[in-house]
Amino acid sequence: MREAIGGTWLLGFVVLFIVLFSAYLAVSINYTKAFRVKNQIINIIEENEGFTKSRGDVAGKPLDQLQNSNKTEDKIYHYLKQIGYATTNIEDDRCENGSMQTGGYCVERVCTRQGSYYKVTSFIKIELPLIWQSFVIPVKGETKVLYWTVDDITCS
């Protein structure tokens, strides 16, 4: 009888290890995706030399119109739709000084004497269904200093 109970404990440890390892993999994959999204948003802003907002509802536009647009917000939203990045139900107050953009990221312009740069924040949302908790983790980054910008965001 003692060996049967010992086997149950061992089985419990194995199941716990599998659950913890799977949770670690899921979090690391989501973090990697949010990090990649932040880097691509920074690249798009630097390529376009600023952040220009779209006219109208970005989410309602067809993908070919988003891809061929000259607005930075359209290009970023097209990229987010392509890779399947969706952060829903994140409060607007998660952005420090900027505003939450369609697609679940924040952009803030910061002016300096030499020019201006942008702070970009993407988010990871982790939901734990068994304990009904969700965590939102920001992933932050900055563009290089742009000496000449064409955008719709005022300096902070």
Image (spheres, rainbow, N blue to C red):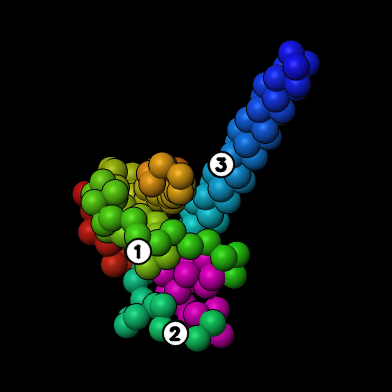
Report if residue 8 lies within the magenta region: no
The amino acid type found where label 2 is placed reads: Lys
**Residue tagged by mark 1?**
101
Side of 120 where 40 appears, left or right? right
First of labels 3, 1 by sequence position = 3
The amino acid type found where label 3 is placed reads: Val
**Residue tagged by mark 3?**
27
Q: Where does the image place residue 22, in percent across and percent down from the top left?
A: 65, 40
Question: Which residue is more in the foreground, 25 or 94?
Answer: 25
Span of residues in magenta = 64-81
Q: Alpha carbon of mark 2 to alpha carbon of mark 1: how far? A: 15 Å
First of labels 3, 2 by sequence position = 3
Query: Which of the image's four quarters has the N terminus?
Result: top right
Q: Quadrant of residue 57?
A: bottom left
Q: Would residue 10 be visible to someone looking at this image?
A: no
* Mark 2, secondary structure of its residue: loop
**Residue tagged by mark 2?**
61
Q: Where does the image place residue 5, in percent across and percent down from the top left?
A: 70, 19
Q: Residue at x 49, y 57 (%)?
A: 41
- Mark 3 Cα shell of 10 Å, populated few (<14), some (14-19), many (≥20): some
The amino acid type found where label 1 is placed reads: Gln
Q: Residue at x 54, y 70 (%)?
A: 81
* Mark 3, secondary structure of its residue: helix
Q: Where does the image place residue 104, in percent across and percent down from the top left?
A: 40, 60
Q: Where does the image place residue 61, in percent across and percent down from the top left?
A: 44, 84
Q: Is residue 140 above or below residue 70?
A: above
Q: Nearer the viewer, mark 3 or mark 2?
A: 3
First of labels 2, 1 by sequence position = 2
Q: Would residue 99 be visible to someone looking at this image?
A: yes
Side of 43 where 90 appears, left or right? left
